[in-house]
Image: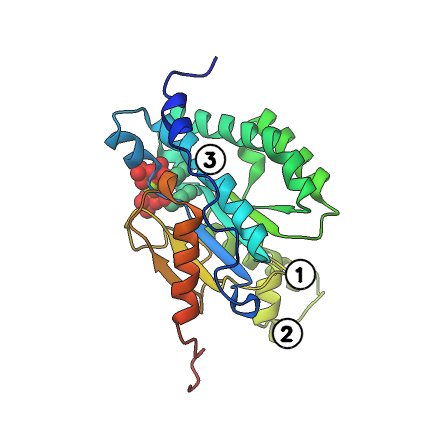
Amino acid sequence: MFPVWKGVFRRKRVGRIEADRPCRSEEIPSHVALIMDGNGRWARKRALPRAAGHHAGMLAMRDVIRAADDWGIKVLTLYSFSTENWKRPHHEINYLWQLVDEFFQLDIGELVARNVHIRILGEPSQLPQATQVTIARALESTKTCSGLVVQFALNYGSRWEIVKAVQHIASRIQKNEIAVAEIDEDMVSNAMDTAGLPDPDLLIRTAGDQRISNFLLWQIAYSEFVFVDVMWPEFTRKHFYSAIQAFVARERRFGGLK
Ligand code: IPE
Ligand code: IPE
Ligand code: MG
């Protein structure tokens, strides 16, 4: 049975607003990372349970994935659950895993049809068994897909990712596979969960807070940041489009001169 509140946002669901690319295809960021924040505040404003905010957030996420695919973005990284989010009440955490199950079960057909390749950042081994099975199936179903890469950061913390990378490199030194002097930026990048993918060009955070909250600390060295005030469940492809246009208007110098 769907709880009563599910009808509230179904009626308000925003459909496709912009099907066209927001700018010339060569200006489209290759990799967009998203901190999807504000589900709880969205729900509180409507006197709904936080779970309703997370469910509405899942619907917003679905449309953002479609937009990224429609516009030719190569990699989309979605911060879905941080290592610090375990501090939340059990019932909220359990609902979030239920939503992960629901999302992958309902959307996997469309993702495969869109040729979307799914990757996971973080430690799924600490998730409930049923969620791990759903995730493993989704990874298996999309492993040969060669289109948009969607990375779900699930039980992800950037500091822990860096610690794991250091441990991995140190163990290779211990086994005499590499020398200390061989460690370089590429080796560190390749020891991260994001190995083999370009760094984010654009990082968007919703809900007004201007912080990183332990997300991709190594990878965002030269990303452009766009902070938007709308709560994540209200974030539509129109907001996504505006964020990309803000990105296109920036001058990226990477420490050099214009
Ligand atoms: C983001 O929304 C979703 C997760 C962190 C899982 P929040 O649940 O953090 O919403 P606010 O920040 O409390 O409004
Ligand atoms: C960041 O949001 C994590 C996710 C969006 C999954 P939080 O709501 O956990 O971040 P803080 O606590 O406001 O920094
Ligand atoms: Mg939050």
Q: How many marks?
A: 3
Residue highlighted by disc 2 = 182
Q: Residues within 10 Å of mark 2 (few under 14, many from 20)?
A: few
Q: Is residue 107 left or right of residue 258?
A: right
Residue highlighted by disc 3 = 58
Q: Nearer the viewer, residue 179 or 70?
A: 70
Indicate if the residue with disc 1 has its beta carbon within 8 Å of ligand 2. no
Q: Residue furthest bottom?
A: 257
Which residue type carries mark 1?
Arg
Colour theme: rainbow
The Cα atoms of the two marked residues, 2 and 1, are separated by: 11 Å
- Residue visible at 66% across and 45% down in the picture: 114
Of mark 1 and mark 3, the one earlier in the sequence is: 3
Eyeballing the image, is 17 above or below 192? above
Q: Residue furthest right?
A: 144
The Cα atoms of the two marked residues, 1 and 3, are separated by: 40 Å
CB atoms of marks 2 and 3 within 8 Å: no
Which residue type carries mark 2?
Glu
The kind of secondary structure element at disc 3 is: helix
Of mark 2 and mark 1, the one earlier in the sequence is: 1
Residue highlighted by disc 1 = 172
Q: Position of residue 54 (x, y in %)?
A: 40, 32
The kind of secondary structure element at disc 1 is: helix
Q: Position of residue 214 (x, y in %)?
A: 40, 52
Q: Which mark is residue 55?
A: none
- Residue visible at 60% across and 58% down in the picture: 74
